[in-house]
Structures are given as C-alpha cells and as structure tokens.
Amino acid sequence: MTDKIPVHNDELPASGIEILSFEGLAESPDIPHRDDHYMFILQRKGLSVWSIDFKECTLEQISLCFVAPGQAHHYLESKNAEGWLIFIEPKLIPGEYRMALDSFVFHQRVIHAGEDHPVFTLADLLQRFITDGGNVFYQSILHSYVHTLTGVFAASLIAEPGMAIKTGNHKYQLVIAFKNLIKQQFREVKQVKDYAAQLNITPLYLNEVTKELTGFIASYWIQKEILLEAQRLLFYTNMDVKEIAFTLGYEDHTYFSRFFKNNLGITASAFRQNNHYLSNHRH
C-alpha cells in the first residue's frame, strides 16, 4: 500500500490504441492504479472480477464494462474468461462519445450483452487490422474503427434502462467542457461561478444547461468528483483524513469532514474502516 495511487502514463503505443486478449490475465499481478487512457473490457465468456473505484464489478458470461481515465482500478480474479481489453487514448474518442461514457462513471454499470453484439465483431476486426498493419491508410482506418467501436459501446450504455442522456449541439459541448474542467481543476476550483467564468457564461445558465442535460445542477458534479476522489484515497491509500483534505484543496480538515458526512451519511474514518483495501484486499 502506498501514500498515493500510482498513475500509469504514456503506456500506449504511438497509435494511442492497444488491444489485448484475456489470455494470461490470471497470471498478471495487478495493483490498484490509475491510467491516463480508457480501458474497455469486452468479455465473451466466463467470469472476471475487477475493482473499479473501490467497488467490485463482476462480469459474467457475455458482458461489457469500461474504466475511464483517472479511475482507480485493478484486476481481481477470473475463471475461464475470454475476451479483449482495449486501451484507447481519450483524444481519439469523439467528444460526444466521451461525454456519454463519462456520464456513467458514477454508476459503473456492467452491460450484459448478447453474443451477436456488434462490439465483439468490431474488436475482432480491430485486432486483425492492428496485427496485419502495413495498410497505406492505416491511421485513418484505425481511427475509424475506434470511432465506431466506442460509439457502439457508448450507445449500449445509453440504451440501458434508466440511463438515457440528452444530447444536443452547443449545450452538449458546453457540458462536455464543464465536466472536463472539473476533472482538471476540482482540487483547486470548487465554485460554480468560477467554472462559469471560464466558460464565459453565467452561473445561472450553467446550472440550467447542466440540469437539462444531466438531471443535476452544476454543483452536484463538482461535489461528486471531490467525493469520489476522497473515497478513492480513503480506500486505496494510507493517507490520513487531514492529508486527504489538504490534497483535495481544503485547508480546514474539519470542514472537509463535515462535507463528506453530510453528503455520504458516514464519516470519512468510518468509510475507511468499512472499506480499506489494506485490510480487505484479496489474494
């Protein structure tokens, strides 16, 4: 265990895409870490168990799941599992697909798919294309595969019961920009008005648009990001509550403790006692 969650940066090849089969997954030691890219888990059979942001995600038989950049995760176990892990740099995924994906980070759904789901055909074609290489239009075709695969994946998320999101043009792009700013600045910037100023709009309009497209006002998403990061640090590290509060931009750790309890209904210390990876990690 460490005082921080390791971050794996710049691990992908120059293309920004890598696809691996499940073979050897059980023999690969894995510790909690973050990536700077997306990981798509496409399972065709068997069972695999993953820890994603301090929650166990069990994939049974034909299932889909993904891990977004910055999420703490690691592989736990598998049994007769077959499928692919596809790693993709965020810049290669169209913005509207990224917003759809990122909207579900807090839900962390596992999609139970049919054997004829097109994402498996696309993954197979993508793996063959990368293996063959040498095509004069290699980069363009590769990006087309990525656009199609991630679009199909995102559409499957949106089709899940109760998980639809609204899309649009200017408003949609505005919410994408807002959420990107939160990811980059939530430790330093915590007020809706400060994000609105960066987007050259009023706080009222930012709240209206965010509520219209996501169902929640802007402050909800700021607080959600802070709380999620706090839970990651409590679960995966040995940092004490004061250190975590300071890391998240709170000079007054008692204020942070009240904020945590008021929103989650449990103290930060109690959350750690109930969930700490150090005490409960699996072998």
Image (spheres, rainbow, N blue to C red):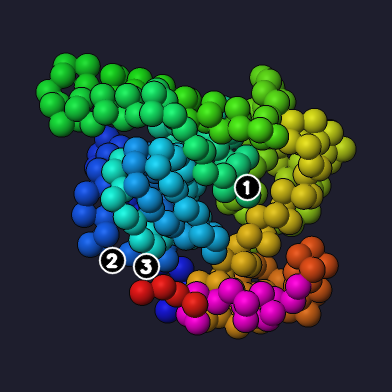
In what element is the residue under mark 1? Answer: loop
Determine if the magenta segment contains residue 162.
no
Q: From this viewpoint, which residue is outermost toward the top? A: 136
Question: Where 31 sits versus 131, above or below?
Answer: below
Q: Which residues are magenta?
A: 266-279
- The residue carrying pointer 1 sits among few (fewer than 14), some (14 to 19) or many (20 or more) residues within 10 Å by Cα, namely few
Determine if the magenta segment contains residue 278.
yes
The answer to whether the residues at label 2 and label 3 have Cβ atoms under 8 Å apart is yes
- Between the residue at mark 1 and the residue at mark 3, the CA separation in whole angstroms equals 23 Å
Quadrant in the picture for residue 17: top left
Q: Give the dominant element type of the magenta stretch: helix, strand or loop.
A: helix
Question: Where 11 sits versus 207, above or below?
Answer: below
Three-letter code, disc 1:
His
Residue 43 at what x, y percent from top left?
37, 41
Residue at image point 27% right, 59% down: 26
Specify the quadrant that holds the N terminus: bottom left
Q: Can residue 97 be seen at all in this image of the molecule?
A: no
In what element is the residue under mark 2? Answer: loop
Question: Where 52 sits versus 209, above or below?
Answer: below
Residue at image point 21% right, 54% down: 24
Would you say 66 lies left or right of 125 here? right
- The residue carrying pointer 3 sits among few (fewer than 14), some (14 to 19) or many (20 or more) residues within 10 Å by Cα, namely some
Sooner in the amino-acid sequence: mark 2 or mark 1: 2
Q: What residue did someone put label 2 on?
A: 29
Sooner in the amino-acid sequence: mark 1 or mark 3: 3
Specify the quadrant that holds the C terminus: bottom left
Three-letter code, disc 2:
Pro
- Between the residue at mark 2 and the residue at mark 3, the CA separation in whole angstroms equals 7 Å
Q: What residue did someone put label 3 on?
A: 31
Residue 101 at what x, y percent from top left?
55, 37
- Between the residue at mark 2 and the residue at mark 1, the CA separation in whole angstroms equals 27 Å
